Amino acid sequence: MAVFEWSKRMICSCVLALFVFSFIAETRTAPAALDNPEEVASMVSIIIRNSTERKLMQLRGSPSSCVTGNAIDDCWRCDTNWLNNRKRLAACAIGFGRNAIGGRDGQFYVVTDPSDNDAVNPRTGTIRHAVIQTEPLWIVFQRDMVIQLKQELIMNSYKTIDGRGANVHIANGACITIQNIKHIIIHGLHIHGCRPTGNALVRSTPSHFGWRGMADGDAVSIFGSRDVWIDHNSLSKCADGLVDVVMASTAVTISNNDLWHHNEVMLFGHSNSYKGDKVMQVTVAYNHFGEGLRQRMPHCRQGYCHVVNNDYSSGWGIYAIGGSANPTINSEGNRFVADPKRYPYSNQVTKRTSGDKSEWKNWNWRSKGDLFLNGAYFVESGATGANSEAYAKASSDVKAQKSSKVRTITSAAGALVCRRNRMCTRK
């Protein structure tokens, strides 16, 4: 009885706190930067709720319906009050990009205007106006919108773009550029139809704009940047890559994305000759590689790639994981399903795109706990047992789950549908 009365009092306190925050969220929708809604009270509310949930779990048992073994989603997605706890997401990153905090320490900015009419003097309330600001910002969206960018969206450091609660498409124009900055989180967007743009003036900060050459048409281009997390996005049909990581970028995690209908999916490393990419460390985890993908899932040059618990469900036109210039590739707990009917000559998961066997036989590529179906197979290389230092650099903090669990772990990959007072779901 004492435990019940204690829990009842705590629940009442929690409900009161949630009511206050619901009122704040509904009334504060100005297009420019907003004050962070009662940060101290929010932290207290989280503490109360977590304490109450622990007590209720002891009484009723742990809720298994939302826990999947996906370390990112299990950190935040069971919270039906995600709307008022948006910044909780920043504590859930894993892998080499685990330190990315985005705009956690800043104010909220509500995008109210989907237009992009002036890349030099962006209108207040647009996504372009939000991402160029110098201070940390957590960027959210007032409503569903399709944003057709006229020029590449050049971001500034310490920004989160959080599409939860709205159906946000960046489509059929320029897309996102993360260049020479740090601490970026991109979450919950649909990005597709990206096209080459450029040879134009584009603003990158409130005080600077400059001439930009032609951009390739990547969905997300990460150039000379670090502490970047790309999570729960739906990506397809762009002119060049879906996610490219180049020019000594490092500390990057690409997770929980749904990718389909594309040729060159992910390129890590600028070129075979650019030695700056030897520092690159990228985690690719919990992604769903779906229909119509041909190659580069990912393709690694020079650096260190941890590919863990991804679902390659629909075959690959040429190869799934490739590389050149002696990268270290650590493949763990993935599910590789070849499609010999559609791609009869592409059962091999791996492809070395430079050098002959006398060269690449010494590259450190290993498969550990992967599941191979329909004739899929992985060609390993490197001296067995002699590469502990290299594999240590290609092993992020993601503990690989059994490959038999991958379909469950990746079942919610892609942009989620998030409604007030409900858990975010894939559909």
Image (spheres, grey):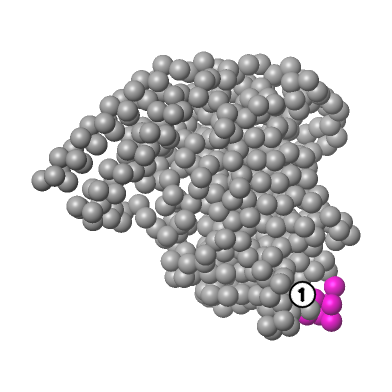
Question: What residue type is disc 1 on?
Answer: Trp
* Residue nearest the viewer, comparing 31 with 390: 390
Residue 277: x percent and y percent?
80, 56
Secondary structure, mark 1, is loop
Q: Residue at x 63, y 55 (%)?
A: 96
Q: Judge whether 316 appears above or below 41 on screen.
A: below
Asked where in the image residue 216 lies, by quadrant, the reply is top right
Residue denoted by label 1: 363
> Would you say residue 91 is visible in this rendering?
yes
> Horizontally, is 304 left or right of 141 in the view?
right
Q: Judge whether 169 appears above or below 208 on screen.
A: below
Taking the view exactly as shown, the residue that stands out farthest to the bottom is 384
Q: Residue at x 64, y 40 (%)?
A: 184
Residue 415 lies in the magenta stretch: no
* Residue nearest the viewer, comparing 416 with 9: 9
Residue 198: x percent and y percent?
81, 32
Mark 1 Cα shell of 10 Å, populated few (<14), some (14-19), many (≥20): many
> Where does the magenta region start and end?
355-361
* Residue nearest the viewer, comparing 67 with 324: 67
> Would you say residue 344 is visible in this rendering?
no
Asked where in the image residue 196 lies, by quadrant, the reply is top right
Numbered-mark total: 1
> Horizontally, is 213 left or right of 396 in the view?
right
Asked where in the image residue 228 lies, by quadrant, the reply is top right
Residue 138: x percent and y percent?
56, 31
Q: Judge whether 3 appears above or below 406 on screen.
A: above
Taking the view exactly as shown, the residue that stands out farthest to the front is 2
Residue 63: x percent and y percent?
28, 53
Q: Residue at x 86, y 28 (%)?
A: 211
Quadrant showing the C terminus = top left
